[in-house]
Image: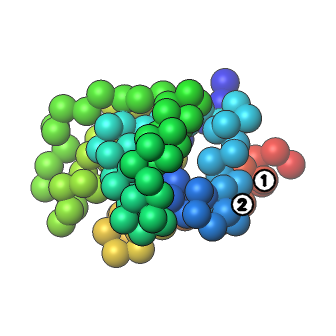
Amino acid sequence: MPQRVVFDSNVIISAIGWGGKPRQCLSLAQDGKVHGLTCSAILDEVHQKLIQKLRFSTDRAQRYIEALREFLEVISTTGEVKGVCKDPKDEAVLECAVLGKASYLVTGDRDHLLPIREFRGILIVSPAEFLRILESDST
């Protein structure tokens, strides 16, 4: 059974806009090598940032969101994770990982999420760390 993984919005945006390790991570979910998880808070932020930062049209951004929904399982969050992070958006990401029974949360958030390292048994790692872990698990 593939690992269950939440990709934070910054990883998804980097994958779409710049490629590199974030794209390698997202491709693992697209190819079915890991079970990718997301939630409406992540998808909403991706949509917003695609328009604001990458200058996508609303229609183009929406097509990307629809494509993500094809290979990422959307977890319904309820707002039960509170008081863990300074940013409530980060708490929605953590809750997505908890409710989705994720093994990993892959993020580029060095200020709020990466310093936590682990939350309720979920490892919080950078894209590079995640790829290293998967590589070492396969050898």
**Where is residue 77 shown, x and y percent of the image?**
25, 33
Q: Secondary structure at mark 2?
A: helix
Residue 124 horizontal side relative to residue 94, left or right: right
Residue at 81% x, 45% y: name it. Answer: 138
Residue furthest out toward the bottom: 111
- Where in the figure is residue 105, as x and y percent of width and height? 47, 50
> Residue at coordinates 52% horizontally, 54% vertically from top-left?
12
- Dividing the picture into quadrants, the one containing residue 48 is bottom left
Where residue 130 sits, quadrant-wise, is bottom right
Tell me whether the residue at label 2 lies in contact with that at label 1, contact meaning CB atoms closer than 8 angstroms: yes
Q: Is residue 137 above or below residue 116?
A: above
Number of other residues with Cα within 10 Å of mark 1, as a class: few under 14, some 14 to 19, many 20 or more: few
Q: Secondary structure at mark 1?
A: helix
Image position of 18 with respect to 33: above or below: below
Q: Is residue 76 above or below residue 63?
A: above
Residue denoted by label 1: 135
